Image: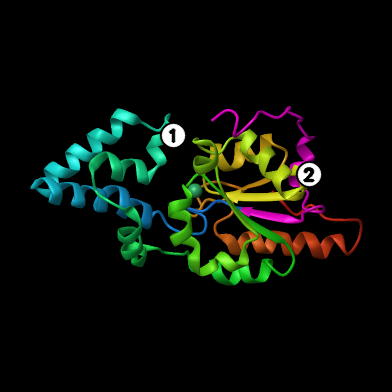
């Protein structure tokens, strides 16, 4: 794992740079909670796997779920296998996860503003997805908007761990831009806001419940801030519209 995701030297940027969109060329999005709801992942982990497990062993739904969830806990989120749906299907003898994941794709829910916002931003910025969700989930989740993204990056599939500062530093290297040219938006304070900020990205916290002062309530707010910044930067002296 360490070889796949080497550490990069930490260089912290001045705080005020985290509030300036002037040099933005890339807009990076978290996936679950930001572009799509958690419904698809939950359906797979909490319904599909227990259903198949119970059917294979003749267990009730409740008993199957209890056993599967207990098995999950024997691995835990600190290990790479936790995120690997192929591992769990092999471990439980459930066959190929692909077809059943495809069947449950009906549970994928993009947030309503997402297609129009992505369409608009894609004409001005390189759009990427930077997610902790494994690629096996990201592909069906994002299929309807995938053509609008220049890249989809998964920290768990690439590094076996949740998004951290090194992941965002590596993202900038792979996109061949300074981290400060990336605006990253996501709904997890630690994984999206703190990790991306620490790497030097311009991080924006998405709070769809609107309970956090200064956070974005949805992606239209992101678009408005980027629009405001670009219009003020063409006016008097460059803008920093971010909060
Ligand atoms: Mg999220």
What residue does disc 1 label?
80
Please state if 152 lies on the left or on the right of 169 as rendered.
left
Is 176 colored magenta in this rendering? no
Residue 191 higher or lower than 233, as above or below: above
The residues bearing labels 1 and 2 have C-alpha atoms spaced at a distance of 29 Å
Please state if 43 lies on the left or on the right of 231 as rendered.
left
Determine whether the beta carbon of the residue marked 1 sits less than 8 angstroms from the nearest atom of ligand 1: no
The quarter of the picture where the N terminus appears is top right
Residue 129 x, y percent position in the rendering:
59, 54
Who is closer to the viewer here, 149 or 202?
Answer: 149
Q: Main secondary structure of the magenta part?
A: loop
Residue at image coords 52%, 48%: 187
Residue at image coords 13%, 45%: 62
Residue 106 x, y percent position in the rendering:
34, 67
Residue at image coords 35%, 41%: 87
Residue 179 higher or lower than 43, as above or below: above
């Amino acid at each position: 794992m360490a070889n796949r995701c080497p550490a990069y030297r930490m260089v912290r940027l001045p705080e005020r740079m985290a509030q300036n969109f002037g040099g933005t060329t890339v807009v990076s999005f978290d996936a679950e909670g930001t572009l799509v709801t958690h419904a698809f992942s939950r359906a797979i982990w909490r319904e599909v796997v227990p259903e198949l497990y119970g059917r294979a062993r003749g267990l009730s739904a409740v008993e199957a779920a209890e056993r599967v969830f207990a098995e999950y806990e024997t691995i835990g989120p600190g290990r790479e296998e936790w995120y690997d749906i192929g591992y769990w299907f092999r471990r439980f003898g459930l066959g190929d996860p692909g077809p059943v994941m495809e069947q449950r794709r009906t549970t994928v829910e993009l947030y309503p503003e997402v297609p129009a916002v992505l369409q608009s931003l894609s004409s001005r910025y390189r759009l990427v997805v930077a997610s902790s969700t494994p690629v096996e989930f990201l592909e069906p989740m994002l299929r309807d908007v995938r053509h609008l993204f220049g890249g989809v990056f998964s920290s768990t599939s690439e590094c076996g761990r949740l998004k951290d500062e090194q992941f965002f530093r590596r993202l900038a290297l792979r996109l061949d831009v300074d981290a400060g040219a990336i605006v990253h938006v996501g709904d997890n304070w630690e994984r999206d806001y703190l990790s991306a900020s620490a790497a030097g990205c311009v991080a924006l916290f998405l709070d769809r419940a609107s309970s956090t002062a200064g956070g974005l309530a949805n992606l239209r707010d992101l678009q408005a801030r980027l629009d405001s910044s670009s219009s003020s930067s063409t006016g008097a002296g460059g803008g920093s519209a971010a909060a």
